[in-house]
Structure formats: structure tokens, C-alpha cells
């Protein structure tokens, strides 16, 4: 699948990794759907930038991926604009850092609903379009926290990321042989997601990384673009870590 004019939905693309993925795929000629939750200004800025800098189509759609009706509306609006969806990047997620004994059901549900139920719903409503097209790529943004990095301050986040890895493996079976379903699992990446973590902890974490630095969103975006491209057509059901070596 050449990336030129492919219709891509990136959830949570107003900031951070999602924004970089949107820009990198726009640079390769994709039509970009920028989904966001609250940050209309940043999403609109990105849409205008993409159109101007990469000379391709881009739209913004506000929708909460944790709510089924909103996901249905999101998919409907994309089909009205572009008639199809070729690539889905399940990127939107939240983390609520709180000690285990202070966590409550509201935090737990919100995290699981956004990070796991959201990707499930997006796959449920977009996979039929890809199956009809006999082709498509789904790339889920997991985390090393779903594999081998654990933090009791974010058990629901870690569980959601383990869950999205399981979703990836299961959908690679369910959607075969037409849709490639893969995940990337970043380690520490410089985005807003880590802005409330203490400087001290961040320094300790940096020391554990072989490369002695956190990653940049564009470094994750390059891996996502590769998985979306024809060069990755024989990669399926795979979880690829991008963490500088921990
Ligand atoms: P971020 O900077 O906090 O951005 C999160 C994005 O998700 C924003 O665009 C936000 O929209 C959107 N979002 C949040 N809840 C949403 C909802 N219910 N519906 C739709 N959009 C929603 O996050 P990031 O660091 O770029 O993370 C991107 C992905 O990488 C996530 O899956 C995260 O778990 C994963 N990851 C990140 C790191 C890291 O160190 N940063 C490490 C491993 C994995 P608004 O701007 O409108 O609020």
C-alpha cells in the first residue's frame, strides 16, 4: 500500500506522539484525520500547518474515543469526507498517576475506557471498512508499561497497555489475511504525558536507559510510518519496543 492519498485516522493527534505521526504521514502524502478531545486550538493549528507545509488534505474531528456513540459519529464523519479509511493509528490515551491505595474506580474506569475500550471500538467500526477494501493497516500505540515496566502508581494504565497488546494479537488473527495489525511500545518519550512527574524520578529513569535520554515523538512517528507503509507488508501481529534500550 503506497501511502500517497491514503486516508489515515490518528486518535489524539492534537499533541505529542499523535501530532508527530500526523505530520510524518502527511509528509508522505496521506490524507490526515486529526482526532482530539479538548484541544481544538492545537488541532486546528496542526490541520492548517499540514495543508500548507505538506500540500495534502487534513481535517479535525472532535470525539471522545471512550464513548461508543462518539466513535460511531467519528467514523461516519470521516466516511462523509473521504469515503474510506485505510490506516488507523490508535494513539489517544491518558495516564492518572496516583498511589495504588489512593486510586478509585472513577480513575480506573476512565483510564481503561480511553486506552483500551477506545481502541476496541475504533477497530470494531473501522475494520469492516478495511475488510471490504481487502486491505488496511492498524497500528496501536502500546507502551513498555504493558510489557516489562511496572509502576503501582499507574496500574490501570499498565493494564490498559497490556490489554492493547492482547487486542493487537487477537485482531491480527481476526482480520487476516487483509489487515495488518501491529503495535509499537514506546518507553519514555518527551511529551505532556510526563509533565507532572518529578524531576528527580525523571533523572533516575533516564539513567536506566542505555541511550541515556528520553525519545522524541518524531522517533516514534517514524516507526509508525514504517508500519503503515508497503515496506512493512509482511509484519503482522507484532509488538515493537522503541525505548532506547532499558
Ligand atoms: P499526550 O501528549 O498526553 O497526548 C494525548 C492525546 O490524546 C491528546 O491529543 C489528547 O487530546 C488525546 N486524548 C486524550 N483522551 C482522549 C479521548 N478520550 N478521546 C480522544 N482523544 C483523547 O500523550 P502522548 O505522550 O503523545 O501519548 C501518545 C500515546 O503514546 C499514548 O497511547 C501513550 O500511552 C503512548 N505512550 C506515551 C509515552 C510517553 O512517554 N509519552 C510512553 C509510552 C507510550 P487533547 O489534546 O484534546 O486533550
Image (cartoon, helix red, strand yellow):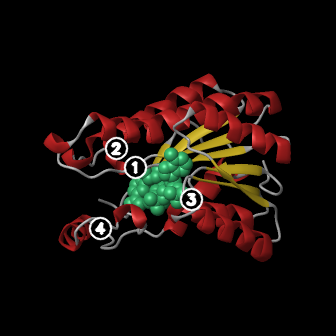
Q: Residue at x 26, y 69 (%)?
A: 206
Q: CA distance from mark 3 to mark 2?
A: 18 Å
Q: Nearer the viewer, mark 1 or mark 2?
A: 2
Ligand 1: does it lie within 8 Å of the C-beta at label 4? no
Nearer to us in this view, 69 or 184:
69
Instruction: Give the CA separation, mark 3 to mark 1.
Output: 14 Å
- Decide which of 150, 244 is in the foreground and name it: 150
Mark 2: is the Cβ under 8 angstroms from ligand 1? yes
The local secondary structure at tag 1 comes to: loop
> Which residue is at a point 27% across and 47% down the rendered structure image?
154
Measure how far apart labels 4 and 1 are at the Cα level: 17 Å
Q: Of residues 178 and 43, which is closer to you in this image? A: 43
Estimate the x, y position of residue 163 in percent, counting from the top left: 41, 34
First-in-chain label (1 vs 2): 1
Q: CA distance from mark 1 to mark 2?
A: 9 Å
On the image, numbered disc 4 is attached to which residue? 210
Residue under label 3 = 18
Mark 2 highlights which residue?
157
Badge 1 crowding class, 10 Å Cα cut-off, few under 14, some 14 to 19, many 20 or more, is many
50 to 108, vertically: above or below = below
Figure check: 75 above or below 222: above
Task: Name the spot of residue 232 as percent of width and height, x first.
Answer: 65, 48
Amino acid at each position: 500500500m503506497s501511502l500517497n492519498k491514503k486516508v489515515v485516522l490518528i486518535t489524539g493527534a492534537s499533541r505529542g506522539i499523535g501530532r508527530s505521526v500526523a505530520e510524518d504521514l502527511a509528509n508522505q502524502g496521506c490524507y490526515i484525520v486529526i482526532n482530539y478531545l479538548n484541544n481544538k486550538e492545537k488541532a486546528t493549528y496542526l490541520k492548517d500547518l499540514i495543508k500548507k507545509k505538506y500540500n495534502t488534505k487534513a481535517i479535525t474531528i472532535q470525539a471522545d474515543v471512550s464513548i461508543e456513540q462518539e466513535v460511531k459519529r467519528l467514523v461516519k464523519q470521516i466516511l462523509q469526507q473521504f469515503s474510506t479509511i485505510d490506516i488507523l493509528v490508535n494513539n489517544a490515551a491518558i495516564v492518572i498517576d496516583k498511589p495504588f491505595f489512593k486510586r478509585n474506580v472513577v480513575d480506573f474506569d476512565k483510564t481503561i475506557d480511553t486506552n483500551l475500550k477506545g481502541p476496541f471500538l475504533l477497530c470494531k467500526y473501522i475494520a469492516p471498512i478495511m475488510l471490504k477494501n481487502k486491505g488496511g493497516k492498524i497500528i496501536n500505540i502500546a507502551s513498555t508499561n504493558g510489557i516489562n515496566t511496572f509502576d503501582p502508581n499507574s496500574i490501570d494504565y499498565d493494564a490498559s497497555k497490556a490489554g492493547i497488546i492482547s487486542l493487537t494479537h487477537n485482531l491480527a488473527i481476526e482480520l487476516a489475511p487483509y489487515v495488518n495489525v501491529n503495535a509499537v511500545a514506546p518507553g519514555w518519550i518527551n511529551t505532556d504525558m510526563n509533565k507532572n512527574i518529578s524531576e528527580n524520578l525523571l533523572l533516575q529513569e533516564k539513567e536506566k536507559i542505555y541511550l541515556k535520554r528520553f525519545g522524541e515523538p518524531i522517533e516514534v512517528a517514524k516507526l509508525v510510518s514504517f508500519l503503515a507503509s508497503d515496506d512493512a507488508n509482511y509484519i503482522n501481529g507484532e509488538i515493537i519496543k522503541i525505548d532506547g534500550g532499558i
